[in-house]
Amino acid sequence: MAAKKQSVDDPPSVDDSSQDWDSFVTQHGDVEAEAEDIDWKKMAPDEKALARYQRKQDESLEKHAEKWSWMKDKKHKQMFAEIEGRLQGAMGKGSFYWVDRRVFDQVFDRLTLLSIFKLMKKGIIDTVEWPIARGKEAHVFRGEGEEGAIAVKIFHTSNAVFKSLVQYIEGDPRFSGLKRRHRDLVTIWVRKEHRNLIRMHREGLRVPEPIGLLNNVLVMEYIGDAKGPSPKIREIEVEEPQLVYDYLLYFLAVCWQRARLVHADFSPYNILWHDSKPLVIDVGQAVTTQHPRSREFLVRDIERLITWAKSQGLEVTTADALYDILNTDPGELWAEEEE
Ligand code: ADP
Ligand code: MN
């Protein structure tokens, strides 16, 4: 390739990752508008350099393995003492059997604690109560915020996982000019999930309302009740699958035609059953329709939906669904019942 490769060993310095989207846009311009000008080939991840960089990071992490010594620093000690009480559930006094020190160590590294601390100062998080789910990429906790229950999604800042996520960020014009340092990838990822939630929520789609973010911590509306999070549609028996299918088709159509997004991980694992209706979560990997692989991701989403629908006894086809999502006015696919 003729173009000079951007060195990931020495990434261009972008200021600290706590910046919000607005200042990001001020700094980098509204990159969304420039999508046409992007040379996609040039943006393909330089895998080797990325791997080399990650290896270096791993080594340096090992070298500095006195992981928790920072907690004893005077400044941090004070901060930690301040938030300790509000992190109780996560620290092992919760009612879930696996809430223990190991979870705490795994999830609450320095950056995370600082981020939570700042979100508490801002009033976005009041308490972090108990873990809802632990995934490969993130842990989700239930907490309390200014206006009630919140879900706090904390992304791991360790290296391994995010390699697989690069494909969804590379190629999305909103995130083009950024350095590839791992932490920044996590931060970008969180920002991406937040932005995607905003775009979908703005179109009136049933997704958790975005509430706030900082670094690797995303705060959104909690979907569930006092007993626990709402179940996934794969865990329940759906009584009127046709209605659910109609809504999910509508959801994908509004995403494509209005929000200009493709969910890209649309599966019965990421659709909750809440207030007797479906609600879609986990939108971090959603890409804009300009993404070079958006159509491929869309077809995959549709195929998953069709598989689910068929398992519910519906007679539907991928071709019809694809046609509707691309062409039919969403209003004809599903209409909110008057209550
Ligand atoms: P991932 O699958 O990448 O780990 P998800 O966003 O799907 O991340 O979240 C993991 C799990 O956490 C979900 O399956 C769901 O059970 C729970 N969860 C996620 N977001 C919320 C929310 N806003 N309210 C309640 N539970 C949530
Ligand atoms: Mn998920």
Image: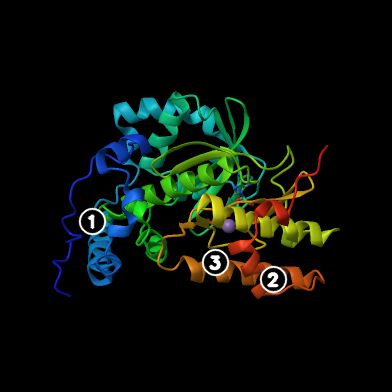
Tell which circle, 1 or 3, labels the residue nearer the N-terminal end.
Answer: 1
Q: CA distance from mark 1 to mark 3?
A: 39 Å
Residue mark closest to the camera, 1 vs 2: 2
1 or 152: nearer the eye? 1
Question: What is the secondary structure assignment of the residue under circle 2?
Answer: helix
In the image, what residue type sits under mark 1? Ser
Q: Is residue 271 left or right of residue 186?
A: right
Q: What residue is rendered at 22% in x and 67% in y?
A: 49
Mark 3 — residue?
A: 298
145 or 324: nearer the eye? 324
Are the residues at dot 1 and dot 2 in contact (C-beta closer than 8 Å)? Answer: no
Q: What residue is rendered at 25% in x and 39% in y?
A: 27
Whole-percent x, y for residue 76 in the image: 34, 30
Quadrant in the rendering for residue 26: top left
* Label 3 crowd (10 A; few <14 / some 14-19 / many >=20): many
Of the 4 image quadrants, the one containing the C terminus is: top right
Whole-percent x, y for residue 258 in the image: 55, 50
Residue mark closest to the camera, 1 vs 3: 3
Q: Is residue 21 left or right of residue 29?
A: right
Mark 2 — residue?
A: 306
336 or 186: nearer the eye? 336
Q: Is residue 337 left or right of residue 202?
A: right
In the image, what residue type sits under mark 2? Ile
Q: CA distance from mark 1 to mark 2?
A: 47 Å
* Label 1 crowd (10 A; few <14 / some 14-19 / many >=20): few
Q: Is residue 170 above or below residue 84?
A: below
Question: What is the secondary structure assignment of the residue under circle 3?
Answer: helix
Mark 1 — residue?
A: 60
